[in-house]
Each structure stands twice: as structure tokens, then as C-alpha cells.
């Protein structure tokens, strides 16, 4: 019985996700679902990316958190359209929550939409939101063994970002080991190394984002 | 209907958790449920604690992971009784998984049991396992705002450990801000600052563990 209920929920979620995707496509918006452990630096990545894209791309953000508006306040402070979703205890965003948030965003004024998921390396992987690309962010202090322990998330991502590479010399994180494990799970994944603190490595990430946006922008 | 199913599952879980607790009590074992984000350093904390307790306390470990046995291999390598649970995609341990693991451990040879939960700052909070104390580990690179964003986990813990304090001077983590937020959610919580890398701050944590163990040891 439990399985049946779960299947029904997923199927309803996927239907709403497909409608979200159509709505985004009709406005020429490219949407990225940003998933990571708590504290990997999702909001800092989004803020640094906005800095690099200023004047070139119009960005909107949906912030998913269990409670509070710490992240939305940080994004709003730099003049970006942002909607906060509070899941009220829920461990992931679902497509219905995102549909509601989309209704509050000025879609005609957005080229790129970041959807920052709840910090969780497990549950968000099971829920499509209507995004075009799933981006998993990991950070060097978490260790290079995370793909082995959380394989589903890493298997289903289109892009993996290694954040906090400015701390690399202080830690045991081995980028080669990490990349080998991710690639064995997910041969077609793109991997970028960045520091949202120093901006190191952002060139390739921004180039890739710009190419994705140009595919859909009207 | 969804709510009813969830309630039934939780209630069955709590019944098994109560039986686990009785089994542990009958052997004079004190059990700690270690919960944290992926990469906060749960296994490193357990390994460093084992080092401090060697010759004084007999330790056993249950390792919870979605997949693999990376952590159990690290614990087993130092000669400790360890059982690996693979949840097969599941985002938390439940009491039934722990009951099965307890059946494989030499309970008459253990004083202290660490149950390392799946790395997840949300879902494990909802499932009691039969543990005596819930320990939440956070790490300085995650940032000092985690209690605001993941309030349930921090509200229900008996103990919060701040790990990786050796990195404090390099990061924006403010221990006073962090402690103030945790205490506002959870006035009776104990907070320890440690580095599992250097051993800094382990004195108070070990003293507290020893006092807990003495309460139940036969």
C-alpha cells in the first residue's frame, strides 16, 4: 500500500513538472534545479553567478527551505526577483510548490531561473520540478567519498559542481578520486570546480550556463 | 490517506524503537544516534572518540548508508565491532533496520553504541531508533545559519557538536551566533566544540560520554 501511494504522488508530481516546463519554455526561460547537502554553498553559488551574469542575463530565483527566509533575503538584497518556499518540515521541493512560486515571479522579465532545493543529498533526487538541468553541488570539506554514499543524486545530475576549491590545500579532498567516482556512476556528467568565495573556476561554469540560456531565450 | 499511512509507519517504528531500547538497557549499553549533513564528519568523530575511549569503554558501531561500506570499513579497520546497514536509497535509518543490526552485534561485549545515521539534516529527526541520546553534528564550513533552516533536527537533539573548529579562522562561521540560535530552539541542549582532526575540544565531550555510560553500565 505504501508503494502505491508513493507512485501516485510521483506521477501527479511529474504531471505538474511537465506543466511547469511548458510554462518556462513558453517564456524562453532556462531553469536549473540546484541540489546539495546543507551548507555546500548553494546560495553563495547563486549570488556569485548573478555577479558574473549582471547586465547579460536576467535572473530569477526560487528559494526552498524548511523554514525561514535567510536565503531569499540574501538574494533579494542584490535586487533579484526571488520567491521563498517554506516546506514546513518537508525534505524536498515538489513540482506543485514550484508551480505556486512561478505564479508569483515576473516570468516575462527572466531568462535564467535558479531553483534552490532544500539542503538534502537524498530526497530531492526523486522529484522533478520542471527544470531543464539538475545541478548537484558538493563542497570540498564534505570529502571526496560522497558520490559512493549518495549515488542516486550524483547519477541523475546533468552537472556536478565542486565548490570551495579555495580550501583544497587544507583538506583531504582528492578531485581526481571524486571525478572518477562520479563519472563511473554517470559517464555523461559535466563537472566544474569553483570557489564561490574567490570566483576561481567560474569562467567555464558561466560559459556553459550562457550556452544553455541561448538555446531557449526568445 | 497519506497522513494515515505516515502515522501508522511512525507508530510501528516507535514500537520497535522501544524494544531496541529495552534490549540495549538489558545489556547496560548506552546508544547514541549520530545525525548530520553529508560530510559533517560523523565517521571521523566516531573514530576520534574511539581513540580517546580505548581501554576504558567497549564501543560498537552501526553504520547507516544508502549504499556501500566505506564507513564500516574505516571503523572495522581499528578493530571495533561494526555492522553496516544499506538503506538502498532510503534517506534515514528506522528502528527495524537497527533491530536487525543489533541481532548481529556482540551485545555482551559493548558498553557504548554509536548509530551513524544516513547523512541528512531533515528526515532522520522523525525516526527514533531506540537510542538514549540524539546527537546532531554540524561542521563549521556549513555555516552558522543551519539551525534556522533545519530547525526540527536541532530542536530535538539532546547534544549538538560543532565539528571542524580547526578551520574556524578561515571561515565566516560565528560560534556565538550558532549557539544563540540553537539555544533559542532548544534551551536544554548541550553544545560541544570539537575538531575530529586535531582532537581539540574532545575533553568535555568525552567527560559527558563517560558520565552517560556510567549511568547504564552493568
Image: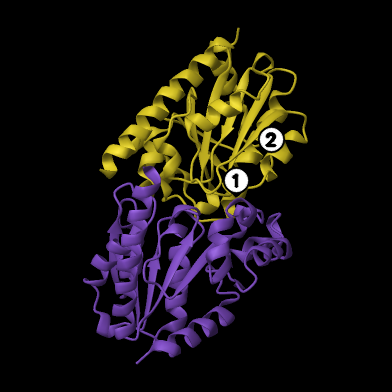
Chain colours: A purple, B yellow
At label 2, counting other C-alpha atoms closer than 10 Å, the crowd grade (few under 14, some 14-19, many 20 or more) is some
Residue B208: image location, x then y, percent: 55, 22
User: Which picture quadrant has residue A214?
Assistant: bottom left
Q: Is residue B36 above or below residue A97?
A: above
At label 1, counting other C-alpha atoms closer than 10 Å, the crowd grade (few under 14, some 14-19, many 20 or more) is many
In the picture, the quarter occupied by the N terminus of chain A is: top left
Residue found at the far left of this picture: A104
Residue A182: image location, x then y, percent: 65, 64
Residue A59: image location, x then y, percent: 36, 79
Q: Secondary structure at mark 2?
A: helix
Q: Secondary structure at mark 1?
A: loop
Q: Nearer the viewer, mark 2 or mark 1?
A: 2
Q: Going by the image, does A135 lie left or right of A84?
A: right
- Mark-to-mark CA distance, 2 and 1: 14 Å
Please state the chain letter of the residue tagged with numbered disc 1 in the rendered image: B
Residue found at the far top of this picture: B218
Closer to the camera, A82 or A188?
A188
Name the residue: 45% across, 66% down: A34
In the picture, the quarter occupied by the C terminus of chain A is: bottom left
Q: Are marks 2 and 1 in contact (CB under 8 Å)?
A: no
Closer to the camera, A61 or B61?
B61
Closer to the camera, B191 or A160?
A160
Residue A104: image location, x then y, percent: 21, 71
Name the residue: 30% across, 75% down: A79
Question: Residue B164's mark?
Answer: 1
Name the residue: 30% across, 85% down: A26
Asked if both marks, 2 and 1, belong to the same chain, the answer given is yes
Q: Going by the image, does A87 lie left or right of B193?
A: left
Question: Residue B47's mark?
Answer: 2
User: Which picture quadrant has residue B5?
Assistant: top left
Amino acid at each position: 500500500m505504501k508503494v502505491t501511494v508513493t507512485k501516485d504522488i510521483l506521477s501527479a508530481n511529474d504531471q505538474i513538472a511537465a506543466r511547469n516546463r511548458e510554462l518556462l519554455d513558453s517564456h524562453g526561460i532556462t531553469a536549473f534545479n540546484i541540489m546539495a547537502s546543507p551548507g555546500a554553498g548553494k546560495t553563495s553559488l547563486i549570488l556569485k553567478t548573478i555577479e558574473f551574469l549582471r547586465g547579460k542575463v536576467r535572473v530569477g530565483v526560487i528559494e526552498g527551505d524548511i523554514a525561514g527566509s535567510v536565503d531569499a533575503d540574501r538574494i533579494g538584497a542584490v535586487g533579484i526577483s526571488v520567491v521563498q518556499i517554506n516546506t514546513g518540515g518537508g525534505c524536498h521541493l515538489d513540482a506543485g510548490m514550484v508551480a505556486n512560486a512561478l505564479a508569483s515571479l515576473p516570468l516575462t522579465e527572466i531568462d535564467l531561473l535558479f531553483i534552490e532545493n532544500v539542503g538534502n543529498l537524498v530526497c530531492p533526487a526523486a522529484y522533478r520540478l520542471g527544470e531543464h538541468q539538475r545541478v548537484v553541488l558538493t563542497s570540498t570539506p564534505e570529502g571526496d567519498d560522497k558520490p559512493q554514499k549518495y549515488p542516486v543524486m550524483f547519477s541523475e545530475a546533468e552537472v556536478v559542481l565542486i565548490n570551495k576549491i579555495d580550501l583544497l590545500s587544507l583538506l583531504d579532498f582528492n578531485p581526481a578520486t571524486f571525478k572518477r567516482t562520479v563519472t563511473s556512476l554517470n559517464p555523461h556528467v559535466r563537472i566544474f570546480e569553483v570557489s564561490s568565495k574567490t570566483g576561481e573556476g567560474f569562467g567555464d561554469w558561466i560559459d556553459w550556463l550562457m550556452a544553455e540560456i541561448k538555446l531557449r531565450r526568445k
